[in-house]
Image (spheres, rainbow, N blue to C red):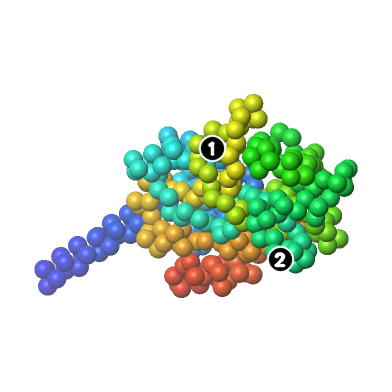
Amino acid sequence: MKKILTVLIGAWFLLLSNTGESNAACKNVKIANMNWASAGLMANIDKIVLEKGFGCNVELIQADTVPAFTSMNEKGSPDIVPELWANSFITPLNKAIKEGRLHRLNKGPITGLGEGWWVTPAFRKKHPEIKTVMDLLKRPDLFPHPEDKSKGGFVTCPAGWACQLSNANLFRAFEMEKKGWKLIDPGSAAGLDGTIAKAAERGQNWVGYYWAPTAMIGKYNLVKLDWGIPFAGKENWDGCIAKPEKDCANPKPTAWITPAVNTVVTDKFRKNADKNLITYFEKRTYPGKVMNGMLVYMTENQADGSDAAIEFFKKHETVWTKWLPTDVANKIKKSL
């Protein structure tokens, strides 16, 4: 009996020890709450999953991309960045991952995201033969410029945005002026959205720059064009396309750079978190249409990330329950 009792007591302490270790990552979890809608939604969804599903204590930390990465890399906090756009610092990120300070748990937390050139669904329906940017460049006549109907109008980014440089250099790389095109500066974010809304609601043709996930893409079902050519390399992009015209004398035609958007966690969190929690982050991929639809909901209802997270759990159960064990998913359902 003494031997049996000793074994049972030992097993009990071992269980307590393992439970404490597996829950160590949940005692005080800090999640970066970035200042754009999709990232705010994801942060709040992760908060509910960790708190209601895994019993964690979670704090959302207001953050911007570069400061959040720098703090994670140098100080080990925040523990989680749900939506990290890393193109501008991919080299130091990869170095931190290689050296074990950070871990990339999800290489694509949202499908269909990225920047590019888009057209209205009305245009795609009228001209299914135009499938790529290379096809479209031949038809400026289909997008008459508002101030010069003899030219095609391409809606670019407002002055001061980084994407204005990239679009202006691509305009030169594709020799669009020779092909009969002129750039349209919308003046502001509201102006850019206004050009889309006007064209989409009237069933008119429109082509220009935008990005996903966004409420505008979701609301108006814009269609992203394939480029029809490959990406011409980071040297061309980083060393020319993304720079001011004076520093980009010879831009080469190229597809838009593929975005590096990841869910990243600290080494401490990765080592101590419950294995089902790590699996959750690995599986947690939002379909692009679902995310765009949620962003529409947030815009139309003036909902913040916390309110939208509840809406997501109620409306998209078939999506999020696939990311979690049944018992964990049931805990979250009961908490709503």
Query: Mark 2 Cα within 10 Å, few/some/many (few <14, many 20+)?
Result: few
The relative height of residue 163 versus residue 226 in the rendered view (above or below) is above
The residue located at (20%, 68%) in the rendering is 8
Report the quarter where the N terminus lies: bottom left
Closest to the observer: 323 or 15? Answer: 323
Report the quarter where the C terminus lies: bottom right
Q: Is residue 79 visible?
A: yes
Q: Which structural element holds mark 1?
A: helix
Q: Position of residue 231 (x, y in %)?
A: 53, 47
The residue most toward the top is 246
Q: Quadrant of residue 163?
A: top right
The residue located at (46%, 63%) in the rendering is 283
Q: Is residue 153 left or right of residue 14?
A: right
The relative height of residue 326 versus residue 296 in the rendered view (above or below) is below
Instruction: Report which residue position mark 2 lands on.
Output: 128
State the mark number for residue 236. 1
Amino acid type for the residue under numbered disc 1: Asn
Q: Position of residue 312 (x, y in %)?
A: 62, 64
The relative height of residue 41 versus residue 287 in the rendered view (above or below) is above
Amino acid type for the residue under numbered disc 2: Pro
Q: Is residue 200 left or right of residue 233?
A: right
Q: Which structural element holds mark 2?
A: loop
The residue located at (41%, 58%) in the rendering is 278
